[in-house]
Amino acid sequence: MLAISTIFLLFLCTNTNAHTNDDRPNFYPPLWHLVPSSIDEFPLINESVVQYRLIDPWFYPHRLGLFKILVNVTTPYMPFCSSSNASNILFALPSQFGWLFSSNRLFTNGTMYMSTDSWWASANYYLSVVPFLAAVDVGLIEKATFRIIQQENFCSNSAQCFQQIPNAMNQWHLFFRRLRHPESCTAKKKLTPRTIDECYLEPIWSAYKMSIYDSLPLVESKLQYLPSEVEKMFGLGWARLLHLISMTRKNTNLYETLKNQRKFLPFRMLTSLDRAADSNDFPDSVNHSLKILLTLRFDWLSFIEYFWQKLTCTYEGRVYAQQILEVMSVSKLLAFHYLVKASINALIEKCESVPHV
């Protein structure tokens, strides 16, 4: 029960619902309104026989521009989006990227250029370039002539990425194809939270998880450059626990993602002094989430994942799980009440079938 309670507390720290619908610039990642919003806004290179747009994914404005293009081209395909596009469920990607930039986890050190030594920047590469190339492949983004500057062994075109990180490419292809042709999932269904859960959040979480899982072995050599063992524990722990978070299929729009980041993610890299998770410059909510994450025994994860999967394998179960997360900090008794309901639901209801890929 202690292990389960620990996970519930951690989930609470990463999945608080936002109640604000504000379109002020400070809600967007740094420089969002200044970066390219189409391929035509990247630098034009004239060679003797060809012209092309040059994209440097290790230059912060260029990588952020890839995210911005993805948000712009997908918003019309999401009927639940507001006119400001902040309800777009892809916004977790640029919002997280902005947090990495602001906290210097990209090793920009006051510049706009990311270091290939940064573990965070390297892992994020596969959450930016890979979905961008997949969106081009399926026709969401115009097939203009462009080239992506290649660094080290990072894939820079669709063929290379299919060879290097095939499962992630396949999942992003699937997400974008389903987004363009949702009728196979949404036909004769009203747009309800259940429909959004099934037809939109499930495929995007599948793609998001696969990018992370497939990228970890590719960027493992970068761990040595992190500034402390505590930062390493935080990064790897966060990557592992995203799988558990994804089972609830929480909405990944801008406001929910941003509110969680501001309240629960450290705004700087961690040092050895942060191991006790009581740093004076962090809010209590950040110290609380770090204490849970840094003390979590990962040898419990197999059991926890199995248990949590059973609880969240139906829509009703995921609703109960979200209620657990929402009340955990207010009332453990009420959280336990929802845990009992979720457990009973898991015993009575048959799990949903695995989505067909």
Image (tube, helix red, strand yellow):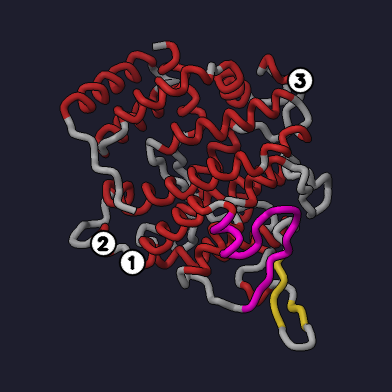
The answer to whether residue 284 of the structure is visible from this angle is no
Q: Disc 2 designates what residue? A: 184
157 in magenta: yes
Q: Residue at x 45, y 52 (%)?
A: 89
10 Å neighbourhood of mark 3: few (<14), some, or many (≥20)?
Answer: few
Up-down relation of residue 197 to residue 7 (above or below): below
Pointer 3: what residue? 272
Name the foreground residue: 312 vs 278.
312
Mark 2 lies on a secondary structure that is helix
Q: Are marks 2 and 1 in contact (CB under 8 Å)?
A: yes
What x and y, as percent, mark residue 23? 54, 56
Magenta range: 145-163
Q: Quadrant of the N terminus?
A: top left
Q: CA distance from mark 2 to mark 3?
A: 51 Å
Q: How many marks?
A: 3
Do residues under tags 3 and 1 come within 8 Å of each other at their CB atoms? Answer: no
Is residue 344 shown left or right of residue 62?
left
Q: Position of residue 200 (x, y in %)?
A: 36, 53
Q: Is residue 152 magenta?
A: yes
User: Which residue is at a point 54% across and 39% down the rendered structure image?
Assistant: 259
- Labels 2 and 3 touching (C-beta < 8 A): no
Residue furthest right in the image: 110
The amino acid type, in three-letter code, at marker 3 is: Ser
Q: CA distance from mark 2 to mark 1?
A: 7 Å
Q: Nearer the N terminus, badge 2 or badge 3?
A: 2
Q: Earlier in the sequence, mark 3 or mark 1?
A: 1
Q: Is residue 166 left or right of residue 274?
A: left
Q: x and y percent of residue 140 in the render?
A: 47, 70
**Identity of the amino acid at label 2?**
Ser
